Amino acid sequence: MFAEKVLFWVLLAFSLHFFPRTVLTVGTVAPSAGTFGTSPFWLALQFSLAVLGVMLALALFAVTVSDMVADLRHERAVDPLTGVLNRRGFDERAHELLADARNWPISLILVDIDHFKTINDTFGHPAGDAVLKAFGHLLHDAMRQVDVCGRLGGEEFAYLLPNCDAAGAHVFAQRLRENVRRNRFDGLPQSHQLTASFGVASARHGEGLGEMTARADAALYRAKRQGRDRVEVDEKLAKNLVPKA
């Protein structure tokens, strides 16, 4: 961060300014107290200490404020229950990634927990919250460092995968689906198997996040209609994923 760089250089200057003072005083005859107090050396020393002291205080203040702002931004962008980004944080980060051509191809995966309302109705909302928390951690642990994961609302989550085409996103979603099936979640009986449905779409040049989300949502809805616990890809992309005979 800029404030931390400023603090580094101020501390460096504060440390280095002692060396020329030592060199200038080596071998000189010690003056009387009255003479030393009015000497140019002493005045320059006091001035430099005052200036560097003020700069150091301002730099420390800037770092403190910068850290506070960063913490506030983090709290504003993160869903407190699941630990992944909230809708606002996800959208902001997604727009940044989509605007950078170095991230293309880029794909979106929408994830929805199957029959989540039944979980709340059968086991209670505390159990539902425990499932959401564990589910968010599972998604977060599966992501790469460059990926973005967010909770869009309720039991619906989203992944944005930079430098990943539809085929790669499809493989990633299938792996996630299998991980969800194998996992056992706090708040649910050990015999209860949780599943999730996935919709995949890849970004097209010239479209925004809304258009890509609509295509992924249509694929997700198709996965729900066809029995849940499955991955569906945007219809135009799906043709490219069918193996050739």
Image (cartoon, grey):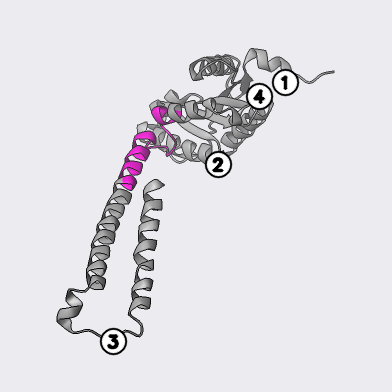
User: Quick check: 102 left or right of 211?
Assistant: right
Which marked residue is nearer to the observer: mark 3 or mark 2?
3
Callout 4, which amino acid?
Ala
Q: CA distance from mark 4 to mark 2?
A: 19 Å
* Magenta stretch bounds: 66-90
Query: Toward the viewer: 212 or 50?
Result: 50
Circle nearer the N terminus (2, 1): 2
Which marked residue is nearer to the observer: mark 3 or mark 1?
3
CB under 8 Å between callouts 1 and 4?
yes
- Residue tagged 1: 241
Q: Residue at x 66, y 13 (%)?
A: 236
Q: CA distance from mark 3 to mark 2?
A: 62 Å
- Residue tagged 4: 166
- Residue tagged 3: 29
Answer few, some or many: residues within 10 Å of disc 1's Cα (few below 14, many 20 plus, some between 14 and 19).
few
CB under 8 Å between callouts 3 and 2?
no
Residue 159 on image: x %, y %: 53, 30
CB under 8 Å between callouts 4 and 3?
no
**Residue at the farthest left position:** 34
- Residue tagged 2: 145
